[in-house]
Amino acid sequence: MALQSFFLDSPPLILEHQYFQQFLNALADQGYLVIGPTARDGAIVYDEITSTDDLPTGWTDTQAGGMYRLEPASSAAVFGYTTSPQSWKRYLHPPVLELWRAQRTNGTFQVIPEDVPPRLAFLGVRACELQAIAIQDKVFLHSEFVDPHYKARRDNIFIVAVNCSHAGETCFCASLNAGPKAAAGYDLALTEVVDKELHYYLVEIGTERGADVMSALPHHAA
């Protein structure tokens, strides 16, 4: 606990890009399936990530009214895009949900216990998306009636936020006080810095779970 308190009270840390695969491995070692951005079918989509090769390194997007285009970027940034056209909601509040199952045996039936939701690490959550998740939490967790299915999924989520470095023409975070910097609701928050031959992440720790992950990685104080 003393080690966790040290990280929580410490200034931001530096994680070099060369250790990003170790970062993904550390999340996997703690039982998390990493869901993050990848370039596929002409867009940035959220899917399972196991390697840095899966990430959209060197890609950016152009967004305007009624238009989305994925393009090669001028830098080697991993998170050099604005936002994905997809939403994290499909993992927290899926459109199709199995409520219960039963098996019939010898004229009777037995209800089969539902599976425990997987432990997921969301990688690359933007500040506006954190705001959207907070609204879902308000509705499904903090209202008079708690949605048990949502709660079971939400309790197993580790959030790695990424602060935005550029805006798209359709961005609206400033008007809603929802970015571009992540303010709350994350376990770890990253700011990616690519400057000539330098490539690293400024890491802010939001929870003890985040401190646990960082304690397993090579890092130094910012």
Image (tube, rainbow, N blue to C red):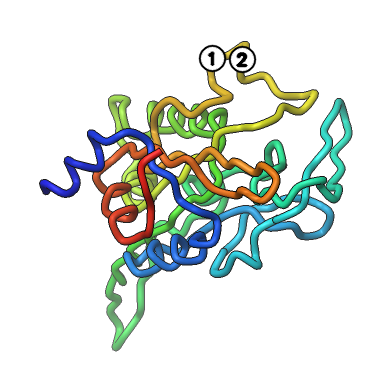
- Residue at the far front in the pictured view: 197
Marking on residue 177: 1
The answer to whether any part of residue 118 appears in the image is no
Instruction: Name which residue lies at 70% across and 30% down.
Output: 166
In depth, the one of 15 and 36 nearer the eye is 15
Q: Which residue is mark 2?
A: 174
Q: Secondary structure at mark 2?
A: helix
Q: Quadrant of residue 124?
A: top right
Q: Is residue 101 above or below residue 11?
A: below
Q: Is residue 184 left or right of residue 170?
A: left
Q: Position of residue 197 (x, y in %)?
A: 67, 51
Give the Cα distance between marks 1 and 2: 5 Å
Q: Amino acid at mark 1?
A: Asn
Instruction: Name which residue lies at 51% across and 45% down.
Output: 201
Q: Position of residue 106 (x, y in %)?
A: 29, 88
Q: Position of residue 37 (x, y in %)?
A: 63, 53
The answer to whether any part of residue 177 appears in the image is yes
Instruction: Name which residue lies at 38% across and 42% down.
Output: 13
Please count the marks in the image. 2
Q: Amino acid at mark 2?
A: Ala
Mark 1 surroundings within 10 Å by alpha-carbon count, few (fewer than 14), some (14 through 19), many (20 or more): few
Q: Is residue 152 left or right of residue 85?
A: left
Instruction: Name which residue lies at 38% across and 52% down.
Output: 219
